[in-house]
Image: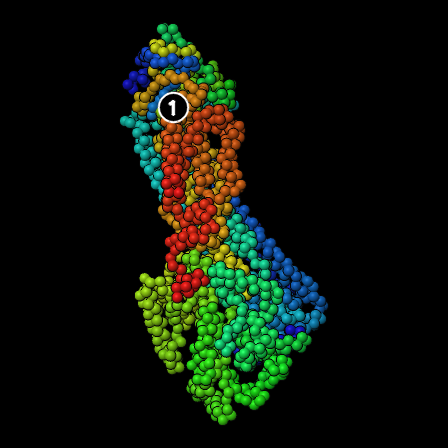
Amino acid sequence: MLAYIQSNETNKTCTRTFLVPKQMKSPVYIYYQLDNFYQNHRRYVKGRSDKQLRSRASENDTSSCDPEDVTSNKSAIVPCGLIAWSLFNDTYGFSVNNTLLGVSKKNIAWKSDQQHKFGSDVYPKNFQSGGLIGGAKLNSSIPLSQQVDLIVWMRTAALPTFRKLYGKIEVDLEANTELTVVIENNYNTYSFGGKKKLVLSTTSWIGGKNDFLGIAYITLGGLSLFLAISFLLIYIIKP
Amino acid sequence: MAGGRRAKLHLSKIYTYACGKTSLKGDHEQIGQPGFSRVVFCNEPDHFEAKIRNYANNYVRTTKYTLASFLPKSLFEQFRRVANFFFLVTGILSFTDLAPYSAVSAVLPLVIVIAATMVKEGVEDWQRKQQDIEVNNRKVKVHVGDGTFHDTEWRNLRVGDVVKVEKDQFFPADILLLSSSYDDAICYVETMSLDGETNLKMKQALEATSSLNEDSNFQNFKAVIKCEDPNANLYTFVGTMELEEQHCPLNPQQLLLRDSKLRNTDYIYGAVIFTGHDTKVIQNSTDAPSKRSRVEKKMDKLIYFLFFVLFLISFVGSIIFGIITKDDLKNGRMTRWYLRPDDTTIYFDPKRAPVAAILHFLTAVMLYAYMIPISLYVSIEIVKVLQSIFINQDVHMYDKETDKPAHARTSNLNEELGQVDTILSDKTGTLTCNSMEFIKCSVAGTAYGRGVTEVERAMAKRKGSPLAHELNGWDEDEDAQIGKPLIKGYNFKDERIIHGNWVNEHNADVIQGFLRLLAICHTAIPEVNEVTGQVSYEAESPDEAAFVIAARELGFEFYKRTQTSISLHELDPVSGKKVERVYDLLNVLEFNSTRKRMSVIVRNEEGKLLLLCKGADSVMFERLDKNGRQFEEDTRNHVNEYADAGLRTLILAYRELDEEEYKEFNKKFNEAKSSVNADREALIDEVTEKMEKNLILLGATAVEDKLQHGVPDCIDKLAQAGIKIWVLTGDKMETAINIGFACSLLRQGMKQIIISLETPDIKALEKVGDKAVIIKASKESVVHQIAAGKAQVTASSGSSEAYALIIDGKSLAYALQDDVKNLFLELAIGCASVICCRSSPKQKALVTRLVKLGTGKTTLAIGDGANDVGMLQEADIGIGISGVEGMQAVMSSDIAIAQFQYLERLLLVHGHWCYRRISLMICYFFYKNITFAFTLFLYEAHASFSGQPAYNDWFMTFYNVFFTSLPPIALGVFDQDVSARFCLKFPLLYQEGVQNVLFNWRRILSWMFNGVYSAIIIFFFCIKALDSEAFNSGGKTVGREILGTTMYTCVVWVVNCQMALTISYFTLIQHIFIWGSIALWYLFLLVFGIMSPSISSTAYKLFIEALAPAPTFWIVTLFVVISTLIPFYAYTAIQMRFFPMYHGMIQWLRHEGQTDDPEYCNVVRQRSLRPQTVGVSARRVARTHR
């Protein structure tokens, strides 16, 4: 498996077909989920240069980016550091009845990141040019502020199992629609035994579907009620 | 006028120490030798040799720091604390790559905390500096040449200056007295601030200089003084003065010490010998031993425990980290390739995993350092200072008469006040006022005197009987009319006797005899004020004076004594006029401790010979004549009553002698007196014995050794609170026992175990005089007595019988020896009251130490005089009475109060509160830091222990400093479980402190457990609730910063709400602090987020963009906070309902409004109450049982 993912020659495209179980109103959010991937590792979290990302002038500010800081001829890598270097590079193409669905990348990153943390005059440079290629490559003619996948990736996840927003499908998906996904399986999760998942989800006012909160609130309410009643009983029986 | 009289009085004594009579031999030969090398050129401070010698100037510095030494010295003091040192080390380490957070954020709280403490130190020292400036700028007249004197500041005084000190001024340095306003160059000095003694001491200058008593005399005055080097001994001084070729030896008689005061003398001239820090008083001042409270000592242990936990979890984390890191390279292949383990630093190198693990250990220690509450020390100090202010400001402990509030001189011991197990009290000046008052008498079997003693007042008050109001009412009316008893030593109120009404009583003749005896049978000397014609008396003891005064007030004014006669102004019962009568004084048979009586033999104007006798009941009743026993039974009853009320009683009796009998007696008596035999005293005793019998009883007197206001009540309350009270006094045993009764420490029906060496065997041995034998026998006797007492106490241990231990100084010396003291202590602990009489200051301190170390409990010593200093310093807490007897005790005490009775409020209210506040505050501090640190730890476990903190650096920094700092301070300053009124109403509440129920390991550990548990709930509920699903309606998922911040929000909410659940006293301040802290966090998050991303990094626009608009954030916060707090809430509710602690019961009581139901109150009060053995209440109970 490892050889397969690390090879440049192998065909990494695979196709999967789902049945949409019930209607999904647009926007339908596309997530990729990684398991056992420690984006919160201290070495990993440190592996970025906020200054460099923000402005062109600080291009050479790569002190925290070791070992992905400079190329062999001492020229700074933009964006430097382990996080950018290990950018997720699987791609997904969706189609329904052989018609391609557009995947929008609009608003998948936080606005503050795009406006203030990733410079519009900073262009990728020397990126993924070293001996060891980590993840995705970047189009060096697009400024960092427009590299939304990078921006999403650079907001490191809190826990080793995490989802990140890949894009949105901006049409409704009716129930029982057959959805075909063409996956470019490029990202190496085999080395560390992690799993990859593709998730499609809609949101409500409260965000995604999270049973925990609901169950927890009901339990808490029940517990409180139980306590209240027992105290009341005690008070009545034995004032 | 007074000075003049004194001068005359003492003139005869004076010449015993005049110049010339002291020889130049002995000590004075040492002058010039090492240790005696000081040379002072009087009146020539600028003498070239004086300059070479470079004596200290007269500036006295009592500050801890100078401007230059402040920084290094106070920093050093700060970092001596383990916790601070630890933070210093982590602060330094945080500048390396090891740090999990930025260096500035780690160092900042330490800087704030250290700065706050240093500011406090600085302010305190500044106040001392102000005092110094005041003292050093006092003015004194100094000779400036040509016989003129000018005012100069003290600090400018130089060795050799001639100064003129005027009446009631302090001496600015150690001064050699040259002359004074008196011709014989004497002066009077008050040394109260040196040794606490109020009597004036006389000093006298050399004859050679005594004529220099005018300013102009000093124009050409020159002298050289050679003397000892500066030393700390107040009572020695060796030197010589060379004056015009004359050598005069100097001794302490000529030395006036700094800090003493010139009294009764218009002015003196003197030469400055020791200045500034060379003066004896400054050399004498030792640093008071620094005392730390039990709670704080335990807190240190707790800190060590936390360090242990910290290192433990760091160690565990490091091992796991090492294992995970090692796995990053498997067979040369990277597993977690995104970490580039092939090209890494030492910190994450899988090839050198053990080293990486060790280094990681340091990182982890730094990260979990948040477990150690960095701001705890400074918070506690702030809280204690504020608590002290409350104590100082308490109007209930303010004494109007002396204008003295309570004064906590150190704030270290506030909470220790809530844990006192044993009080060791001085008697004179502390329990009593040191004044005797004639208050009652029993004449011819009738009791007279309606004066109310403190004990009776307390008993009546307790009973709540109508009598009490009557008593009080009457008393107050009377007091209101005449103010306080106008005449010192006299407090007799009975209209049947006063104003000459006694002539109408049916036993008028007996009363006449009684009063006459009072006026004649004594050794006092009258002093008639020439202007007013009023008579005052100088007597050997205050009770003797009280008798003469009483006689005077009742119409038998003693006004003149010659060698052979006593003259009275008597009220004649027939004519009702004052007549002058003279009694020929034939013999005085003096008082001593074995005879316990004194008699005089007089011949009255009719020529009748009378023997008038007064003495203790134990010796008097047996000497009564068959015919003289008419009133014996009544008198006995009265005397017992008086004695039980703590009054000092004497029996008065007389006898008429016939000439023959007297002649024979006189002959024998003179023979006995003039014998040079060793048995002289025995002979005298034998002779007098024969005379003092067949007496006719007149009656009995009762003198009150006046207790301070409210003492019995206060002792009763303290006894109810379960505090043991020991009295350590220098007084005689009888006096001490009397006071024991007066204070209700002793009562009838209590078994007294008296340990004394006044036994016949020992006395016989003492006559023989072999020291070794005496010591051996004495020790044996003491050990035997202690063992016997112990056996007695053990035998009755089941029953409710109460014992009192009374021991005298001599026996105490043996009882305190190493091999006996434990036995002694065991006996003493078994007794309800312990009274040590005739004890020296050293013994007082030793007893205190014995109790302190032997029982391991908190001791409190209270005293007012210089002789109590040792005891005050030895005890865990020393309380000084800032009364009249000088400042020495106050200066060496930890807390000063004006009267003993304020002890009740100080301990039961302030002590209890402070103890509760501090212990709760410390527990809470540990709780909140453990909660915080454990969320970090749990997060680590999900970040492969790499040392990545869950929160933004600055969030962590400000956790201790801003978001959780003020509420605990408010708790420490303001919280009260029950109000002061209830503290006093239910003294048993105090036992919570003595038994340390609020700060025992169980409680501390449960608070810590609460912290761990809260952390677990917060962490897991947060990560579950913010799972990988979309976080807001925009489909975005939760990143590190959102999870961290949400968790942090929950932590801030939880610990602050926990505080709200914990405290039992809400004021506006608490509300502001608690809710303000939470609001501050949101505000901080907002403001910090608006700042440029280079500062705020991950928190940039976090609140306004991500958190605030997302309902999830708010819902999760609410849910987590409630579910974290519910268990604690339920626990306290159940505890309060079913297993309330004592304060809980009282809170219930108050809540349900049952406080006015005395029966219910009593039930609560009695609960778990062991039978009280001393105090007014116990006495009443005992009385009703009898």
When the figure is inspected, residue B1036 is found, relative to residue B567, above or below; the finding is above
Q: Going 55% across and 77% down the picture, which residue do you hit?
A: B505
Q: Position of residue B197 (x, y in %)?
A: 54, 68
Q: Is residue B349 left or right of residue B121?
A: left
| Quadrant into which the N terminus of chain B falls | bottom right
When the figure is inspected, residue B1009 is found, relative to residue B524, above or below; the finding is above
Q: Is residue B267 left or right of residue B815?
A: right
Residue topped by disc 1 = A210
Q: Position of residue B389 (x, y in %)?
A: 54, 51
| Quadrant into which the C terminus of chain B falls | bottom left
Depth order, front residue of B240/B140: B140
When the figure is inspected, residue B290 is found, relative to residue B254, above or below; the finding is above
Q: Position of residue B651 (x, y in %)?
A: 48, 78
Q: Answer whether residue B231 is visible to the viewer in this image.
A: no
Depth order, front residue of B907/B853: B907
Q: Label 1 is placed on what type of residue?
A: Asn
Depth order, front residue of B141/B806: B806
Q: Quadrant of residue A174?
A: top left
Scheme of image coloration: rainbow
Q: Going 41% across and 68% down the picture, which residue do you hit?
A: B748
Determine the residue located farthest toward the bottom in the rendered image: B660
